[in-house]
Image (cartoon, rainbow, N blue to C red):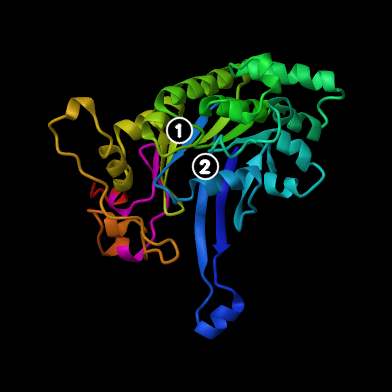
Amino acid sequence: MVADGLAKTFDVSAPWLNRVLERKPRQLLHAVDEASFTIAKGQTLALVGESGCGKSTVARLLVGLYQPTRGRFLFRGQDAHAAYRSRAGLQLRRGIQMIFQDPYASLNPRWRVADIVAEPLREHGLVATREQAQERVVALLQSVGLAAVDLAKYPHQFSGGQRQRISIARALATEPEFLVADEPTSALDVSVQAQVLNIMKALQRQRELTYLFISHNLAVVRHVSDQVGVMYLGRIVELAPKKTLFSLPRHPYTRMLLDAIPKMHDTGRARTPVQGEVPNPLDPPSGCSFHPRCPHANARCRIERPLLRDVGGTLVACHAVEEGRI
């Protein structure tokens, strides 16, 4: 799975007449800007960053819910977005599925669990009879720790963690190779998060699944990922193996995120809070978008936008790292 220069721009302008009367220009929101990464088969890439940095937009681009403004996503060696628009698109979509963030909103409250999980099977023509569908649904529910007696129940009869298990079972129905998980545990209690994450890791081992895991919880990311990409204002600013990123973070933003995590053994040490706020994405700063919050910024950072470069096995977009200032 290769994302090559993916970008998504939304037109958030006021209606045409309002713009004419108020003499305002069009407003464009660059939600994702030149995102590039590769995920090896059976591996997990985690995307982290503050709210509004573009993580969920990347997820929706990969599964085809959004059409990219620029760039492409290669899956099984072909351009996925071109395939989505062709007759081969249905076959490709079987291989890519998504687990949504809110288990309370992603399941139809009027449908029984049997119909929710069986819907992908029927849409893709994977079952011929109702008995076959029920047999497959029972096997899927059991694979995520639920029972056959849950078939006749409605979503409101389950807890949040159980609902997310139903969402995972539905995503696995088409036997995909690639799962995009958009903050699948953020709406759950901590103890339930661990159960869902362990199920996802077990399924990954059994089925050789590849994950794009989106989260703002660095503790969760450390538990599930093989590689970590750090996003800021629509751009990937650091991309590294998990062990490297947590032991030797390069980008100042990554350092600030990691430094903000409370640590048991650092009780007496003063922690550096994440400085400032994320700039308005409709009016981003010039040069490096992080420079207003960065303690290492200089004149070059305010003018020239850094490119993602390899520094000791870590891809970093930072002039200070490139010049050896940090």
On whether residue 283 falls in the magenta region, the answer is: no
In the displayed structure, 15 sits above or below 312; it is: below
Range shown magenta = 302-320
Instruction: Read off the residue under disc 1.
Output: 227
Could you tell me the amino acid type at mark 2? Phe
Could you tell me the amino acid type at mark 1? Gln
Q: Nearer the viewer, residue 21 or 263?
A: 21
Residue drawn at point x = 62 percent, y = 32 percent: 178
7 to the left or right of 288: right
Question: CA separation, marks 2 and 1?
Answer: 10 Å
Q: Residue 155: percent from the left, percent from the top? A: 62, 30
On the image, which quarter does residue 89 sit in? top right
Residue drawn at point x = 63 percent, y = 20 percent: 207
Badge 2 vs badge 1, beta-carbon distance below 8 Å: yes
Give residue 191's mark. none
Q: Number of callouts in the render?
A: 2
On the image, which quarter does residue 287 sit in? bottom left
231 to the left or right of 177: left
Residue drawn at point x = 40 percent, y = 62 percent: 280
Q: Residue 140: percent from the left, percent from the top? A: 67, 20
On whether residue 313 falls in the magenta region, the answer is: yes
**Image quadrant where one finds the N terminus:** top right
Which one is earlier in the sequence, the residue at label 2 or at label 1?
Answer: 2
In the displayed structure, 170 sits above or below 231; it is: above
For mark 2, does the 10 Å Cα neighbourhood hold few (<14), some (14 to 19), or many (20 or more) residues? some
Give residue 37's mark. 2
Q: Residue 108: percent from the left, percent from the top? A: 66, 37
Secondary element under disc 2, as helix, strand or loop, is strand
